[in-house]
Amino acid sequence: MGAFSLAAVLFVVALGVLYQTAVAPLLRVGGVFRNVEPLNNQHCKVVPALEGCEKAILPDDSSSIYVACSRIAGRPYWLPSVSHLNASGKPTDDYVAAYSLDTGEITRLTLSGFDSPRGLSVHGMDVVPSALDPTKLFVYLVNHRAPLTGNAEDVGADSAIEIFETRIGSDVLKYVKTVEDPNVIQTPNDVVGTTDGKGFWFTNDHGVKIGYERLIEGYLRLSRTSVGYCHVVDGCKIAANKLHTSNGITKSPTNDTFYVASSRGGGIQVLEKQTDNTLVLTEVIPTVDMSFDNLSVDKNGAVWAASFPKGLNLLRRFKDLTIDVPSGAVRVTLNTGQSAFYGGKYKVEKVFEDDGHVVQGATTAVYSPDRKLLILTGISSPQLALCSL
């Protein structure tokens, strides 16, 4: 065999390996060949006044759900999680709102004491009742600020975590503290806060802010992401490193178990808190070959995940808001059936799926067992949806 023929064979083999290890998994996770199968989308009410709400929190199955929202018209310009870094198009009126599940009333919370000239650019959020006073709520927000110096497209966003407090029924969000650490809080996506208003864990959804290295880790699905921990007095540190495409994070209300979703088909990672507030990866819940975003845990202990049946469509919608994006929700519970004896520790069920007409690309799924109500909201969705199950 001549040198040219050998080179051609090696080239073909290399292409085959690249397809099997990188391209094919992306196509599967992106839902290129997946058919949308509508499920439990017949009894849904929509709330068009709540658009672009990346995260929703239902504290202790209360009567109000809290949402962190932005105008979706700004998503093609400013969305650091997908490298949209044109700060000139960044909305300046992002907000947190409370939506009453009893009356349908929407209350936008007015900021008090927050005078940052860069304002809020919300993404992940947590709302935590105080351990000392359950009527008092601590609100933790990922804030994707534009950099003070330099072009965001060259240096990335200058993201921080904001801590506020409010009370049940209040329309005021009182500023507490801005926590920033450029070495640890690099690409924050979602956050879980403590009941004293002083500490939190958060996911970094990429290993770096900008550049080709970021693109490579995404396409090859490298384990380069992390969970960080910060305390307002003790500072910040990496709590868990080398995780697989970390996205949403949530914590069990009854123990020290954390759950981290993978945005590129890596299942749901289970981590346990240590005495120094670091996290140890103990197992991965295998799921359908699909992308997940934010997670929540209902009062019965079930983990809920917003899923993307057509994940690549969501990336396209971030640039073109006319593109429809299907939505899904998955429930994860401990398996009590016969298959548990054969290694099936968890039961993973698809509970909701829609072609995008009810909600566009849901990034959060929250379930209220008392109401048998599934709440779906999305970072680029024109409306929040409430679906009876």
Image (tube, rainbow, N blue to C red):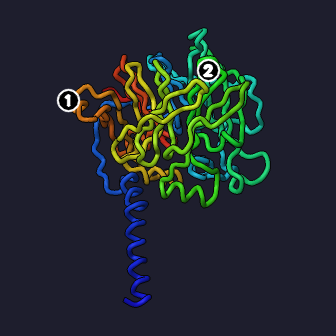
**Quadrant of the snapshot with the N terminus:** bottom left
For disc 1, the marked residue is 338
Residue at 31 percent of width and 32 percent of height: 345
**Amino acid on which disc 1 is placed:** Gln
Q: Tell me: residue 123, above or below residue 272.
A: below
For disc 2, the marked residue is 138
Q: Which one is in front, 230 or 359? A: 230
Q: Tell me: residue 28, above or below residue 180.
A: below
Residue at 48 percent of width and 57 percent of height: 220
| Precedes in sequence: disc 2 or disc 1 | 2
Q: Which one is in front, 142 or 23? A: 23
Please identify, in this view, whether the residue under mark 2 or under mark 1 is nearer the observer.
1
Quarter of the figure with residue 32: bottom left
Residue 229 at x, y = what percent? 62, 32
Outermost residue on the bottom side: it is 2
Q: Tell me: residue 224, above or below residue 109.
A: below
Tell me the element at label 2: strand
Q: Which one is in front, 251 or 40? A: 251
Query: Label 1 neighbourhood size at 10 Å, few (<14), some (14-19), many (20+)?
Result: few
Residue at 66 percent of width and 53 percent of height: 86
